[in-house]
Image (cartoon, rainbow, N blue to C red):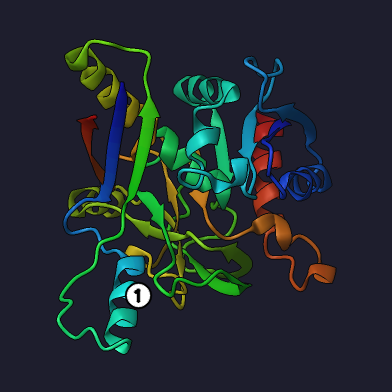
Amino acid sequence: MKARVHVMLKDGVLDPQGEAVRHALGHLGFSGVEGVRQGKVIELDLAATDKAAAEVEVAQMCDKLLANTVIEKYTVEIV
Amino acid sequence: MKAAVITFPGSNCDRDLAVGFEKAGAQVVKVWHKETELPAGIDLIAVPGGFSYGDYLRCGAIASRSPVGQAIADFAGRGGYVLGICNGFQILTEMGLLPGALMRNATLKYICKPVALSVASADSAYTESYGVGTQVTFPIAHHDGNYQIDPNGLAALQGEDRVAFRYVENPNGSVDDIAGVLSENRRVLGMMPHPERAIEPAQGGADGAALFRALSGIMASA
């Protein structure tokens, strides 16, 4: 079973990298981009077979290591 | 006084930090990150700058969960002194020993230069010898030194006089110009600037020496 974790900065936390990407897109002529937020995707290969239990365990992984919940939020997707 | 200086894979200020303490008359024990117990009789743990674990995942994230991390947390929990500089500061916030987080510099650039700091609180073993409002110059060398904290956390830091140093000219976008913060019991200090790189005139300035002398003096007499 695979899990896909999306880690994003929380709303309201300034993302200077996203802002730089937005400006660069503007320079390339993409005028309609009103905001860019940059995050990361982490894929996990799991030995687990129980989807619900895996979701709980991956959430624990996020809280303990994969995300810094002071500034970041995450979502877990079992695929 | 006996200080433990931690070395992670990728630490690069551990030797400078050890010299800072030794020149101030302290005894230094180097501790490798795989240790789960700290040497007996230490008065302070110093977590150095560098790029622990290549800054993988987030700066300080892996180091904060390393074997020695729990020993550092336990030591701090017993009221021990812990000083984290640069990557060490990032590690201490990742461990939850200090509030807030260090994000990418607002300019997105790695900045390496001496900066002027103002001592914002003299109510700590680290800063009392300077006195409030004293201006000191320490080098900074970081890509992720942009200190951020939620409004309630910031109000708590300000209200409890826990901002130890502020930048005179904010180089990295840190909220409230914060360069260093203290824990609630004032014994854990995290700061981005490097006092250990300013301990003798040959380095371009010696303002940092007083910090190590003060610590050494306080703990020698304790």
Asked if one can make out residue B184 in the rendered structure from this viewpoint, the answer is no
At horizontal 49% and vertical 46% (from top left) the residue drawn is B90
Q: Provide residue A17's location: percent of width, then percent of height.
A: 36, 67
At horizontal 26% and vertical 49% (from top left) the residue drawn is A8
User: Which amino acid type corresponds to the residue marked 1 in the rendered image?
Assistant: Ala
At horizontal 65% and vertical 27% (from top left) the residue drawn is B43
Nearest the eye: A62 or B129: A62
Residue ID for mark 1: A20
At horizontal 69% and vertical 48% (from top left) the residue drawn is B212
Question: The N terminus of chain B is located in which quarter?
Answer: top right
Q: Is B38 placed above or below A39 here?
A: above
Q: Callout 1: helix, strand or loop? A: helix
The answer to whether B2 appears left or right of B161 in the picture is right
Q: Provide residue B78's location: percent of width, then percent of height.
A: 48, 19
Asked if one can make out residue B175 in the rendered structure from this viewpoint, the answer is yes
Q: Provide residue B70's location: percent of width, then percent of height.
A: 51, 21
The answer to whether A77 appears left or right of B41 in the picture is left
Q: Provide residue A70's location: percent of width, then percent of height.
A: 28, 43
Q: Is B193 placed above or below A48 here?
A: below
Mark 1 nearby-residue class (10 Å; few <14, some 14–19, many ≥20):
some
Question: The C terminus of chain B is located in which quarter?
Answer: top right
Nearest the eye: B218 or B33: B33
Write down the quadrant of residue B209 in the picture: bottom right
Q: Chain of mark 1?
A: A
Q: Is B12 placed above or below B110 here?
A: above
